[in-house]
Amino acid sequence: MDIIVTRTSALITDADVVPVIAAINHQIVWDFAPKWQVSGTLYLNSGPTGAARCSLQDTIDDPDALGYHVDENGLVEMIIDVEACQSSGDDWRTCLGHEALETLVDSLCNLMGLGAYTSFIREVCDAVEEDFYPGLGGVPVTNFVLPSYFGIGPVGPPWDMMGQLSGPAPALRPGGYIDELTGGAWTMHLGDRADGYMATRKNGRRAWRKRS
Ligand SMILES: [Zn+2]
């Protein structure tokens, strides 16, 4: 799935976005696609017909999120609130990568783990969202879990790209979280040191959401 990124945030310029998109595309090709068997390219301002949309802006209509991705009547859309990221000490660059990678795996926000892990939503960055590593040009890119974390394919370890997780779902890195659906009710598991900013959140730092 291709993703067209547009920027209206006054806090950054298109020139700031260019190297970030390059780093995420490089990560997708070399790190992410081989693990998750998905493909996709991010573009700035214009791209292929039918591509998903991602907006870098300074407002968001969900007070519990810095960013999210949704399936809006079949149109996949991502929102990143750059202002909220900066004011909370977060990095919009890894927030963008977070939403992009999660969209590539589960664009409709409706996939779960397999086997013993079917109660866990298949969000590939939430459990490790505080972890990042240097990407192309030194731009930080987000850690992500591997299919093994959700019971897909060969059993781990490793359970994540950086090899930091101690086990499959619901193991979490510090600052990570995972949503579990049991008996029709959602429960959010929070990792260690999920205090401060995260402690004020009812949803995850970067919530997923599906609109009907
Ligand atoms: Zn997420």
Image (cartoon, rainbow, N blue to C red):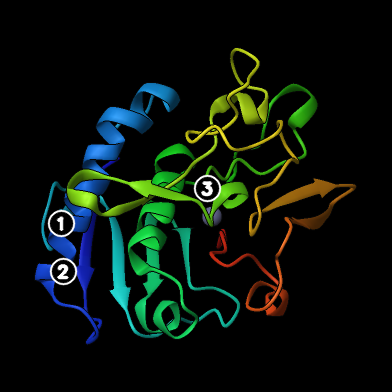
Question: Callout 1, which amino acid?
Answer: Pro
The circle on residue 125 is 3
Q: Residue at x 57, y 83 (%)?
A: 63
**The C terminus sits in image quarter:** bottom right
According to the picture, the residue beneath numbered tag 1 turns out to be: 19
**Res. 90 image quadrant:** bottom left
Q: Could you tell me how far apart the alpha carbons at marks 2 and 1 are, in whole angstroms?
A: 7 Å
> In terms of sequence position, does the residue under pointer 2 or pointer 3 come before the other?
2
In the depicted structure, whether residue 149 falls above or below residue 110? above
Marks 2 and 3, how far apart in space? 23 Å
Q: Quadrant of residue 129?
A: bottom right
Mark 3 or 1, nearer chain start:
1
Evaluate if marks 3 and 1 touch, with contact meaning CB atoms under 8 Å apart: no
Circle 1 sits in a helix, a strand or a loop, which is it? helix
Cβ atoms at labels 2 and 1 below 8 Å apart: yes
Q: Amino acid at mark 3?
A: Cys
Q: Does label 3 point to a residue whose CB lies under 8 Å from ligand 1?
A: yes
Q: Which residue is mark 2?
A: 16
Q: Does 134 sit left or right of 195 as displayed?
A: left
